Image (spheres, helix red, strand yellow):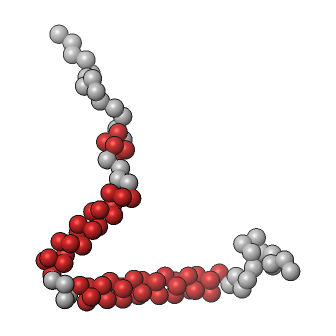
Amino acid sequence: MVLPAKIQPKGRRGPGALLRSTAMSPAHLLLILIVILIIVIIWRGPKTLPLIGRAFGQGVKEARREINEIKSDIDKKSGDGGTKPDGGTKPA
C-alpha cells in the first residue's frame, strides 16, 4: 500500500498565513500598552511610576547620545567634510 507523501488539511493556507492573520492594528497595541501600564501601577504603586519613567528617559537619552557619538565617529573616519557620497561638493 502506497501512502501519499504529504496530505494537507482542507482549510490550510500558506506558511505565513498565521502571522498575517494575527497582525495587530495600532489601536490594539495602544490598548495593550494601557493594560500593561495599569498592571504596573497596581504592581509597583503610583509613587514609583515617576522613578520608572525617569529611568526609562535616562536610558533613551543615553542611547541617543551613543548613537550620535557613533555617527560622528563614522563621519570623522570617512572624512566627508560636507561632500556628497560621489565625491563632489554641494552646489552653491
For the point 65% across and 81% down, the residue is: 78
Residue 92, image x and y in percent? 86, 80
User: Seen from this angle, which residue lies furthest left?
Assistant: 43
Please determine whether, in this image, residue 23 is positioned above or below residue 58. Answer: above
In the rendered image, is residue 90 in sight?
A: yes
Please determine whether, in this image, residue 91 is positioned above or below residue 19. Answer: below
Residue 34 or residue 83, whichever sits in front: 34
For the point 27% across and 63% down, the residue is: 32
Residue 72, image x and y in percent? 58, 86
Looking at the rendering, which quadrant does residue 8 occupy? top left
Residue 66 or residue 4, whichever sits in front: 66
Q: Left or right: 75 with respect to 11?
A: right
Residue 92 or residue 57, whichever sits in front: 57
Looking at the rendering, which quadrant does residue 91 occupy? bottom right
Q: Quadrant of the N terminus?
A: top left
Residue 84, image x and y in percent? 74, 75
User: Seen from this angle, which residue lies furthest right?
Assistant: 92
Q: Left or right: 67 with respect to 83?
A: left
Q: Left or right: 72 with respect to 37?
A: right
For the point 23% across and 69% down, the residue is: 36
In the rendered image, is residue 8 in sight?
A: no
User: Seen from this angle, which residue lies furthest top?
Assistant: 1
Looking at the rendering, which quadrant does residue 88 occupy? bottom right
Residue 18, image x and y in percent? 31, 42
For the point 21% across and 12% down, the residue is: 2
Q: Left or right: 23 with respect to 48?
A: right
Give the mark count.
Answer: 0
Residue 69 or residue 33, whichever sits in front: 33
